[in-house]
Image (cartoon, rainbow, N blue to C red):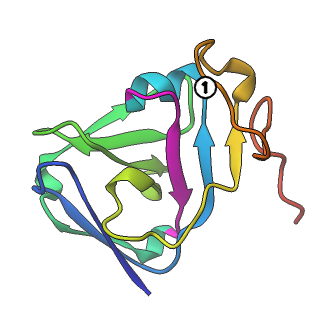
Amino acid sequence: MSISGSCFCGAIKYRIDGELRDGRSCHCSDCRKAFSAQASAYALIEPKDFAWVTGEALLSRYESKKTYEGLLFCSICGSTLCGTYKGKVNGVTLGCVDGDPDISIGMHIFVGSKASWETMPDGVVQYTEGPPPKNS
């Protein structure tokens, strides 16, 4: 399966030759700032499946001292496109995926620090902090 994505202005495009997994929405204060929203919506990918199609030179990087990931965004329109770990893209923002990403948000994380004005819907999987570790 091939998935494409792009920024708001269309200057940067990417392709994923694989699947999105572990769709999640993070409600921590860092994600609210980084995504200018009540939460982020993103999914993990296999780094080997990711490739920039156009506009890679237009990327800007922000490395947070608080988290283990850096964020890559368009230097023209400001769209946050993806997160990195150890220098490789390991997740994409669902808002920049073109078309139907064929994934759903399976968990809401860091709801213990969500904005006071946000109301969580009933029936969603919520974690006060990060997701529980996966069993090996």
Q: Nearer the viewer, residue 20 or 102?
A: 102
Q: Which residues are magenta?
A: 36-46
* Nearer to the camera, 62 or 117: 117
**What x and y, as percent, mark residue 134?**
83, 58
Q: Is residue 63 visible?
A: no
The reply, left or right, for residue 47 in relation to residue 131 is: left
Outermost residue toward the bottom in this view? 1
Q: What residue is at 20 percent from the left and 64 percent from the top?
A: 13
Q: Is residue 28 left or right of residue 32?
A: right
Q: Residue at x 54, y 57 (%)?
A: 43
Residue pointed to by mark 1 = 28
Residue 28, image x and y in percent? 60, 25
Q: What element does badge 1 sit on?
A: loop
Residue 129 visible at all = yes
Q: Position of residue 131 (x, y in %)?
A: 77, 44
Q: Is residue 42 magenta?
A: yes
Question: Image quadrant of residue 136?
Answer: bottom right
Residue at left 45%, top 49%? 84
Q: Position of residue 97 (x, y in %)?
A: 35, 62
Give neighbour class at mark 1: few <14, some 14-19, many 20+ (Cα, 10 Å).
Answer: many
Residue type beneath disc 1: Cys
Q: How many marks?
A: 1
Q: Indicate the quadrant containing the N terminus: top left, top right, bottom left or bottom right.
A: bottom left
- Farthest residue in the front direction? 122
